[in-house]
Amino acid sequence: MYASGNQMFFEDNPFEAVRGRDDLNGLQKIRLLLTLNQSDAERNQINMQAVPILKDPHILAAAVAENRRVLTPLWLELLDEGKKDGSIKTEYIKELSGLLPLINFWLMPPVFPATEEEVYHKYHFVKEVLAHMGLPLYDDDTTSFTVKFITDITETPCGHTLMSEKADSNSEKAFLIENEI
């Protein structure tokens, strides 16, 4: 399943989709890339099905190595472009290019156990840290996709969320979206 997700990524690579866009600055390209990647329902479904296998340390290590090999240089290219055009204001483009591929792993409860509420808290932590580092990635579009990602990722294979009450999570999501916390 993970290999199938990788194949789909290369067939419809969001980094390639934004690379030639002269009408966008580096930060806008990254935001569009995130939106394109998160809006690919078929790829997301395959990736969600593959999440439980990341509990296997060998598969997780291989996934991290593959992401580092493939994604880190792609992130570095876009971050460097954003730094050059002034849309990204950081001295840490190399470090951020290595960090960005790891964030999704950290947000996955099978890899780093967490309730839905804790994953939301992690997301807002990441959002704040990246903005503080000069990389304000998350806007309204990426936030709405992230809410769906968190809901999907925190569901168990039985379809039950890790939180005790689904109603509380729905009100939490609405509060987070409305108040951009």
Image: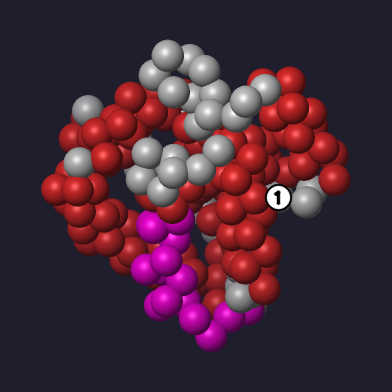
- Asked if residue 97 is among those painted magenta in the image, a careful observer would answer yes
* Residue 100, horizontal then vertical, whole percent: 44, 61
Label 1 neighbour load within 10 Å: few <14, some 14-19, many 20+? few
Q: Is residue 65 left or right of residue 113?
A: left
Q: Residue 64 falls in which quadrant of the image?
A: bottom left
Point out the residue furthest to the right here.
179
* Residue 132, horizontal then vertical, whole percent: 67, 73
* Residue 141, horizontal then vertical, whole percent: 68, 40
* Residue 113, horizontal then vertical, whole percent: 44, 44
The secondary structure making up most of the magenta span is helix
Q: Amino acid at mark 1?
A: Asp
Q: Residue 24 falls in which quadrant of the image?
A: bottom right
Residue for point 67% across, 21% down: 166
Looking at the picture, tell me which residue is in the foreground, 51 or 42. Answer: 51
Position above or below: 24 against 144: below
Can residue 53 be seen by looking at this rendering? yes
Point out the residue furthest to the top here.
158
Task: Find the magenta span and give its range.
Answer: 89-104
Q: How many marks?
A: 1
- Asked if residue 152 is among those painted magenta in the image, a careful observer would answer no
Residue for point 48% across, 47% down: 107
Point out the residue furthest to the bottom here.
91
Q: Is residue 111 left or right of residue 132?
A: left
Q: Which residue in the structure is indicated by mark 1?
A: 139
Residue for point 33% across, 64% down: 72
Can residue 66 be seen by looking at this rendering? no
Q: How is the image coloured?
A: secondary structure
Looking at the picture, tell me which residue is in the foreground, 95 or 118. Answer: 118
